[in-house]
Image (tube, rainbow, N blue to C red):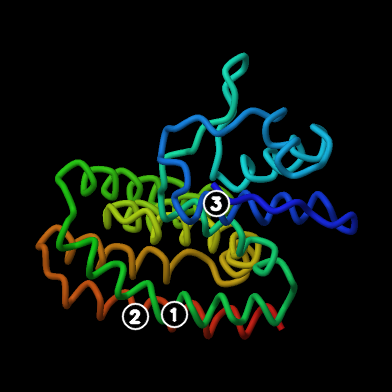
Amino acid sequence: MAINQVKKSCVSEQVFEQLKQQLLNNEWKQGEKIPSENYLADAFGVSRVTVRQAIQKLTILGLLETKVGEGSFVKKAEAGIYMNTIIPMAYLGEDSLEEVLEFRTTIEGVVAELATGKITDDDILKLENCYKEMELYKDNLEMFSKADFEFHLIIANATKNSLFIQIFNIIYDVLYNAMKKVVFKKGNSAGLYFHKLLLDSIKQRDSKKVRQIMDEHMLDNKIILEKYCH
């Protein structure tokens, strides 16, 4: 393992970047314990506090996990965890919201098509229950909005792809309040209409039809959001 002593300026950032690169280069294998804080502090020529700060940052990113009394270990790699770094970008404001809307309009049809090819009976049952909640809460737009969002997340989870799942979680955190405002202004008719069509086509395992309906649904949402959120 090659570790370079760091310069005095931005010491903690240099330690963090070197350790991150070691992890990305598979210097330590998944599940392996990394060297102790004392060892790393000596190797870098810095204090234990600086090393600890870097380790904490890597833990937040999901690259390491710390076990009390044992040390820090390389966390199992899952593609989705690295998407957490785009969260700050997603909250930049109106321009970012428009970018997310464009992304959602482009990707949701593809995701729904993929999910339909992999969907299980259990997934379909969840979608059916979710749609029943939308009908049940059609006059309670707060609860209706939550069920609407959950329907799409179930579809994303049905892809069994950690990247899609994580991306969708991030997108819906960003869009939830804006989408809720639209539902409060327009009502529930479009949601009930498109989700019923999606549910029926998914149950038939008609991937192409599902993609077509989802594309129409997303375009309708985009138009509504542009109308009510500007």
Amino acid type indicated by mark 1: Thr
Q: Return the residue nearer the eye: 61 or 208.
A: 61
What residue do we see at 37% from left, 72% from top? 108
Real-space Cα distance between discs 1 and 3? 38 Å
SS for tag 2? helix
Residue at left offset 56%, top offset 75%: 100
State which tag comes first along the sequence, 1 or 3: 3
Residue at 58% in and 51% down: 2
Q: Nearer the viewer, residue 185 or 16?
A: 16
Is residue 172 or residue 142 the one in the foreground?
A: 172
Q: Name the residue under label 2.
A: 215
Above or below residue 55? Residue 177 is below
Q: Position of residue 145 (x, y in %)?
A: 52, 55
In the rendered structure, find residue 105 and report the number of the disc placed on it.
1
List x then y, in percent, for residue 158.
Answer: 27, 53
Q: Quadrant of the C terminus?
A: bottom right
Q: Which of marks 2 and 1 is nearer the N terminus?
A: 1
**What is the three-letter code of the residue carrying label 2?**
Asp
Q: Distance between the residues labelled 2 and 1?
A: 7 Å
62 lies left or right of 147: right
Asked if disc 2 and disc 1 are in contact, CB closer than 8 Å, the reply is yes
The crowd level at tag 1 (other Cα within 10 Å; few <14, some 14-19, many 20+) is many
Provide the secondary structure element on which disc 1 rests: helix
Tag shown at residue 22 = 3
Left or right: where 162 falls relative to 6:
left
Q: Earlier in the sequence, mark 2 or mark 3?
A: 3
Q: Give percent across and percent down for residue 192.
A: 37, 63
Amino acid marked by disc 3: Gln
Residue at 15% across / 62% down in the picture?
117
